[in-house]
Image (cartoon, rainbow, N blue to C red):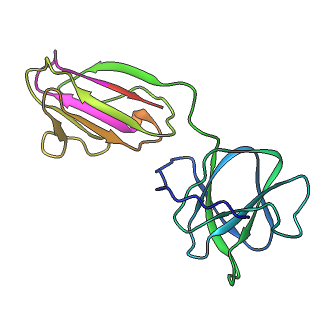
Amino acid sequence: MALLLAVAPPARADTTVKTITGWTQIGTGTIIVNSLSTEGVWLMDSATTPTGSTGAIFLPFGAISPALTANGNWYALQGANAASTRIGVASAGNPATIFANRQIATATPAALPSQAMVNGVVIQALSSNSAAVLVGPCATLSASTGFGLAPGQAAAYGATNLSSICIMGTVTTDAVQYTGN
């Protein structure tokens, strides 16, 4: 009996795309799998390379698995009538650490501190700010290219490191707060 999972796939910065042909080992421990090909993919926890599909979980196109923990190794097999299939494999679940801090705006672009992220970050202008704080990529942020966050407004970014995001403002007592993991 196959278990059918149908949920929208999240954006994950740590996903590796793999092409599957025959039973292929895709990981050990806990992983998350996203089916990227229309024929779907079979998943199985096994100590050795499987020879059949009994006990396998079918993941249809576009679906993402919950965090799957293996007793042995995770193997994947392309769906019916497919020579191969593509899947995304991400490390287990969400990081245990959630980062949060504040940063004061400066007249020139200033990067947020270096911090690796898996699921991205939400940046919010403090509601007590006097003016908009500009947010954007450090390489191009300027008064004419930044995304303006009015006091209390927020924006979410799928950045893999906070330091790729810069802020700037015209009032040097204005600030942003951010959180992510």
Residue at image location 16% in from the left, 28% down from the top: 169
At 32% from the left and 44% from the top, the residue drawn is 139
Q: Nearer the viewer, residue 3 or 169?
A: 3
Q: Depth check: 86 or 102 in front?
A: 86
64 sits left or right of 56 in the view = left
Which residue extends farthest bottom?
Answer: 81
15 falls in the magenta region: no
Q: Which residues are magenta?
A: 164-177
Q: Quadrant of the N terminus?
A: bottom right
Q: Is residue 153 above or below residue 50?
A: above
Say whether residue 31 is left or right of residue 99: right
- Could you tell me residue 36's position as x and y percent? 56, 67
Residue 173 lies within the magenta run: yes
**Front residue (pair 7, 19):** 7
Can residue 30 be seen at all in this image of the molecule?
A: yes
Relative to 8, 64 lies left or right:
right
Image quadrant assignment for residue 38: bottom right
- Residue 43: give x, y in percent of width and height: 73, 60
Residue 79: quarter of image: bottom right
Instruction: Identify which residue is drawn at 57% across, 72% down.
Output: 37
Compare residues 80 and 121 and report the one nearer the observer.
80
In which image quadrant can residue 69 be found? top right
Residue 108 visible in image: no
